[in-house]
Amino acid sequence: MSEELETSGPEIRKLSKMILLICFIVIGSVRGTGEPTYGEMKMIEELIAIVMAVLALTLMANRKPRFEVPTERKTGSALNWFTLKKDSTVEVKVKQLYFGVGIDFEEAGWMIPPHKSEHMLCLIVAESEVEVETQNKGLQTWFLTLVTQSVAGDLYREALKAQQSKVMKWCPSKDLLAAPNLDVDLADSFDVLTVNGGHDVSIRISHEQHPTNPSKSFYKLDWN
């Protein structure tokens, strides 16, 4: 981290003036007696060393970082953040879907990455274990994963259509997940849909190359 020294305080200005004054007095007294002796030179060196040490300690006490580096949130229970290797597709048999913004998940006791508090998120609860190949971490398996941005929006739209056609329903309280923060009622904080009995809901999420921009890719959702 780059750092700068805070030297504008009144105490440091006083110390600087005092150092200059001492140096002028010492140099003037030496010059008034002709060439300095060995003992006088040693005295000057020791005085300068003492003054520099005091100045260094004072400056270190007032050192402040130039840039504030944001830190990851360390509190809450971690959730798997969905990622998929480019040019790959995963199929998920859905059990439940929890829709909310990042702050809702945070208040429920889950750990959310910085700058996601206002993003729409969806927590996918799978019917069975899902294995995916990620971009950076190799093969991973999960039952719960968070998705955001366009995939969360597409899921919400399709889930509401499925609710209207009775394929999905609003999740009863008894079937909700247990949030890490037991004081939060998930039914009040989230829109939660669950698969209606007798139906199967599967989604396919693919990570595709952007058709017109070679430097970008995107996640595409297909609802079955």
Image: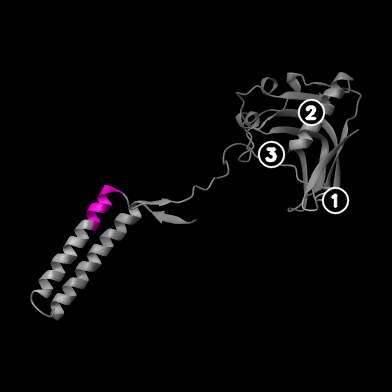
Q: Which mark is residue 87?
A: 1
Tell me the crowding category of disc 2: few under 14, some 14 to 19, or many 20 or more residues within 10 angstroms, Cα based. Answer: many
Q: Which residue is identified by label 3? A: 79
Q: Give the CA distance from mark 3 to mark 1.
A: 24 Å
Q: Give the CA distance from mark 1 to mark 2.
A: 24 Å
> Along the line of sight, which residue is nearer the eye, 34 or 186?
34
Callout 1 amino acid: Asp
118 displayed left or right of 48 = right
Colouring style:
one colour
Dot 3 falls on a residue whose secondary structure is: loop
Please tell me which residue is depicted at 14% across the width and 75% down the height of the picture. Answer: 40
> Along the line of sight, which residue is nearer the eye, 143 or 136?
136
Number of callouts in the render?
3
Whichever of callouts 3 and 2 sits on the residue coming sooner in the sequence is 3
Callout 3 amino acid: Leu
Q: Give the CA distance from mark 3 to mark 2.
A: 20 Å
| In the rendered image, the vertical position of residue 167 relative to residue 61, given as above or below | above
Q: Position of residue 134 (x, y in %)?
A: 77, 50
- The majority secondary structure of the magenta stretch comes to helix
Q: Quadrant of residue 43?
A: bottom left
Q: Position of residue 161 (x, y in %)?
A: 86, 23
Q: Check the picture and name the quadrant holding the C terminus.
A: top right
Q: Which mark is residue 156?
A: 2
